[in-house]
Every structure is written in C-alpha cells, then in structure tokens.
Image (tube, rainbow, N blue to C red):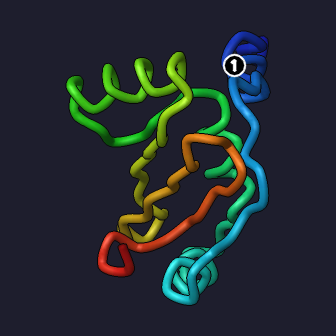
Amino acid sequence: MQPNHTTNKQSTITRFALGRTFITPGAEEALQIAGQTAIEFLRRHMSGDWGELSDEDVKENEFSLREGLRLLSAYQTGKGQKIWIITEGERSATTILLPSEY
C-alpha cells in the first residue's frame, strides 16, 4: 500500500508565522503525560488544521487569517487533555495552553 503523500504534504504547509512560541506549565505537563511534543500541534496549527472547533469558529479563523487577527486552535492530546494554541494578530507570538490557563 502506498503512503498518502497528500496528507503528509498538507501537514507541512505553513499558512502564517508563529512569532515567538511559548508554552504554559500546564500544557507542557499535559504533553509530557501524553508522550507528545508541542511541534506536532504547532505544525497542525500553522497548516490551518484548527483541530476541534465549531464550523463558526473555523470560519472566524479563516477570516482572522486573511485580516491579520488572532487565531485559535483546539486539540486533544492522546490522553484526552484539551489544549489550545493562540497566535496573536500581529503574528509576534504563539502560546500553547490549557483552556483553564486562559
């Protein structure tokens, strides 16, 4: 069976700059517990895979991407912990955090 190169290609497309990246202690612990790294979620975020958002929030992100506004992605770790990634409108900073740390 051939690997799906389209899927791999999509995950490497960068739609915007992250700026400086930060991670809160809670998010760092959640990723460690799940045996996952921040980069896998940052790659999804940068490619426009917004994770587990409503259709309305996806549309808002697409608008925000065009207009230079704040971007939000929501994911779950392999252990079920929700994490958010927020990139500021001017693309100067991106933060990985737990929703409770917002």
Residue drawn at the location 72% of the way across and 46% of the way down: 18
- Estimate the x, y position of residue 76 in percent, counting from the top left: 41, 58
Q: Quadrant of the N terminus?
A: top right
**Which residue is identified by label 1?**
10
- Count of marks overlaid on the render: 1
78 or 25, which is in the foreground? 25
Q: Is residue 3 left or right of residue 29?
A: right
Q: Is residue 24 left or right of residue 58?
A: right
24 or 32, which is in the foreground? 24
- Estimate the x, y position of residue 34 in percent, counting from the top left: 55, 75
* Quadrant in which residue 13 is drawn: top right
Height in image: 17 above or below 31? above
Height in image: 73 above or below 67? below
For label 1, the crowd category at 10 Å Cα-Cα, with few meaning under 14, some 14 to 19 and many 20 or more, is some
* Quadrant in which residue 82 is drawn: bottom left
Residue drawn at the location 63% of the way across and 74% of the way down: 23
- Estimate the x, y position of residue 46 in percent, counting from the top left: 66, 36
Q: Is residue 58 left or right of residue 40?
A: left
- Estimate the x, y position of residue 90 in percent, counting from the top left: 64, 41
46 or 82, which is in the foreground? 46
Residue drawn at the location 68% of the way across and 56% of the way down: 93
Residue drawn at the location 48% of the way across and 42% of the way down: 70
